[in-house]
Image: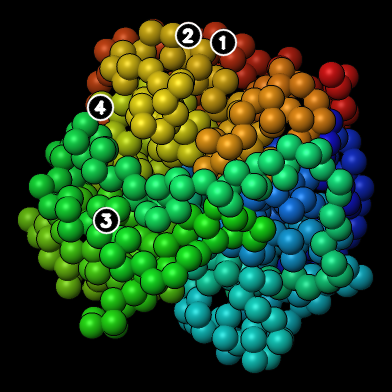
Amino acid sequence: MRHLEGPLCSVDLTDRVTETSSIDGILESYLGGRGVGTKLAHDRIPFDAEPFGSENRLVLAAGPMQQSRMSFTGRVSMTGLSPLTNGLVSSNAGGFLSRNLVGTGYSAIEFTGEADELLAVHVRPDSVEFESVPELEGAEVPDVTEYAASEWDLDAEQTICIGPAGENEVRFASVMTTETRAFGRGGLGAVMGSKNLKAVTFAGGETPVVEFPDVAMDVHRDAATSDHSMKRQGTTAGTDYANAVEAFPTRYFSEREFEGVEGINGDAVESKKYKKGTCSQCAFACKLPTKDEERGVETEGPEFETVMAFGSNCAVDDIVDVMKSNDLCDRLGLDTISCGDTIAAYLMAEDEFGNVDLIHELVEQIGHREGVGDLLAEGTHRVADDLGVHDWSVKGMEFPAHDGRHLHGQGLSFATSNRGADHMYASFYALEYPYVEKSKAVEPHGLDDKPERLVKKENHNAVLDSGVVCKFSRDFIDEETLATLFDTTYDHLQEVGSRIVTLERHFNNQRGFDRDDDRLPYDIPGFPRALSEYYELRGWDESGVVPESAVGDGSGATPADD
């Protein structure tokens, strides 16, 4: 099986020392990216660690596809213990960081400990340098990238950093790269903040390019020549459809259809798009650089989930207002989904839906933990009772769009996801929106036969996250192509994905997670039976707990390859 190669660089922020070690066995078993990050976190983070404690670790890892020139490969994975969910979380970001990380020669870089002052860490092929950066305290993300350019002669694509939200340990703070791309879900930016780590830079030699089978160039060619709607409107291309089938959360999930959708849909976003945007090596170019000169707003996006969180869920029907919310989140380093949903909860409590000035004020207050923002910075799960609203989260993570009350398989996948309410963990919605995966479409209502498909989808996405391959490659990379790219069989890739999901679950089990955490804030017919069937297919017990025999000895030994 093709996998990432290179040593692990362990960075101890407390003592400002580094260690390089071989992890060949782990790479052979877990591909790279999320798989390697999960294995390292599972074995190295104590099960009773505190998310903001020095024992928590952040693992940054690329994958074998970052050594290719294929489209859909401009991504990097980050893994750690989440301050939002209190469980293990992996998040990945696009942009142009990935090749710079691989160019350092390391397969993965982990950060542990806690610095006694605000630091930047510079990773090079032959050294890791620590620099005190008190002048960056409180700096927004664009200010950090400007500093990197002027003081270090480095581009935004060579940097990851946090904004004020991360420094202030907002539980849904993002780690940002290429200025507008986010390791968004789960609050890993707050973990960086707890470690006093403001920024990490990467500079090195040329990214090694490995010979891949011809199918990689076929994928690249198809991505370049496709007239896919996402090339014009990104993920917002499906906004009208989601609204029409009542899968578009509105007014803090109290409704599922938004009367003002035309003001924030794909056409509205496209009307503000002024150039193409993409990630490293990708010819698909689905990103959304947008601006409104009259109101002085320029950003990248908003994507569909942000349109939901700051649009319909807050009852805002003007795309420029949503663009401004998106830009504020990027500058402060905030996950737009969790931030928008938490603000929507506050708007419901205060009967202030649609109050755009208040929304933008709240984003600022959350990022700086000022006023009521200090409460909202804890996330919906922790503040719902205080606000007197329903808790719309799973495992502490706020919901994206693709409402499970219509898309029942997606609802089940929200519950089983080890990350919490995350639509990308299985992307089951793609099967239940017939316009997305037409040949594989299933009836959205009901859960018959869906647990088995869900297991396969979760395993598949774990492989993509470890590859690392963008999930929007789904129209271009089928099972056979994926197996060819990784030089193995698809059945073996399913085993790898299952191993990753099981390790995540085992880690969370040791922290007290079980069936009680796989719950939804609404009812789906047949849900308890489907959940039990899912556990049985996974080989877990009826309580959703992984048996120790399914975990292995943690050695990273390589199973027989196919």
> On screen, 42 above or below 135?
above
Secondary structure category for the residue under label 3: helix
Secondary structure category for the residue under label 1: helix
- Viewer-proximal residue among 100 and 37: 100
Residue pictured at 73% horizontal, 37% vertical: 215
Q: By what rule are the colours in the image chosen?
A: rainbow
Tell me the amino acid under the disc marked 3.
Asp
The answer to whether one can see residue 171 in this image is no
Locate the N terminus and report the quarter of the image it occupies. top right
Across and down, in percent, residue 538 comes to 59, 15
**Disc 1 or 3, which lies upstream in sequence?**
3
User: Disc 2, disc 1: CB below 8 Å?
Assistant: yes
Q: Which residue extends farthest left?
A: 351
- Neighbor class of circle 3 (other Cα within 10 Å; few <14, some 14-19, many 20+) is some
Tell me the amino acid under the disc marked 2.
Glu
Question: Circle 4 is placed at which residue position?
Answer: 405
**Disc 3 or 2, which lies upstream in sequence?**
3
> On screen, 130 above or below 212?
below
Tell me the amino acid under the disc marked 4.
Arg
| Label 4 to label 1: alpha-carbon separation | 24 Å
Question: Circle 2 is placed at which residue position?
Answer: 533
| Label 3 to label 2: alpha-carbon separation | 41 Å
Secondary structure category for the residue under label 4: loop
Question: Circle 3 is placed at which residue position?
Answer: 267
